[in-house]
Image (cartoon, grey):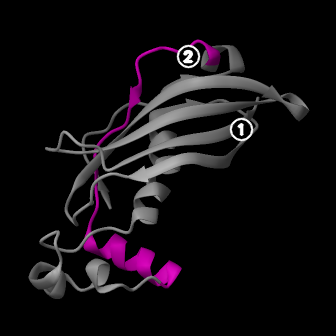
Amino acid sequence: MTGGNAVAAVTFGDAAALRALIGAEPLVSDWLTVDQASVDRFAEATGDHQWIHVDPERARRESPFGGPVAHGFMTLSLIPALLGKTVALKQRMGVNYGLNRVRFTSPVLVGSQLRARFAVESVTDVDNGGVQVEWSVTLERQGSERPVCVAEFITRHYF
């Protein structure tokens, strides 16, 4: 996968800065191009070699999408990387805690450019001095009004 024009990450150093994002405009990532080599590597890593992902010629002939598409879970797996390029947290550590309400609302054809919009919905104190952040995430495909994925992404951060 390749990125487009670099977007400078917004830096936050504490939980108060994250709380200030509740209700604010979403943070928007840079565009990322989904290429066939990345789809093939994901197929190899997960064992999901369905032809709609890894056989471009057959996908062009037989799939309803007109070409190969990225795995839904590959699309989902881009969220942490896109967040990390959009938000820089000065923290001791951070972990992906989970996801809620994930929907794959449109296919991601190979060659598509994607970006993410991250809106902070809540910031809650957790044990060991950390905070849990619930992000509303919308993955967009360039040139399309319809998102390709929507999800609630939950992270934990320890400052």
Q: Nearer the viewer, residue 46 or 50?
A: 50
147 in relation to 65, above or below: above
Residue plotted at (49% across, 33% down): 136
Residue plotted at (41% across, 24% down): 26
Label placed on residue 41: none
x and y percentages locating residue 45 in the rendered image: 51, 79
Residue 66 in magenta stretch: no
Amino acid, disc 2: Ile
- Does 69 sit left or right of 137 as displayed? left
Which residue was labeled with disc 1?
Answer: 156
Q: Report how far apart the C-alphas of labels 1 and 2 lie in the structure.
A: 16 Å
Residue stretch in magenta: 19-47
Residue plotted at (30% across, 77% down): 53
Q: Quadrant of residue 39?
A: bottom left
Farthest-out residue, right: 128
Describe the element under mark 1 as helix, strand or loop: strand
Residue plotted at (32% across, 39% down): 30
Category of crowding for the residue at label 1, using alpha-carbon neighbours closer than 10 angstroms: few (below 14), some (14–19), many (at least 20)? some
Q: Quadrant of residue 7?
A: top left
For discs 1 and 2, the disc positioned in front in the rendered view: 2
x and y percentages locating residue 127 in the rendered image: 89, 33
Whether tag 1 and tag 2 are in contact, CB under 8 A, the answer is no
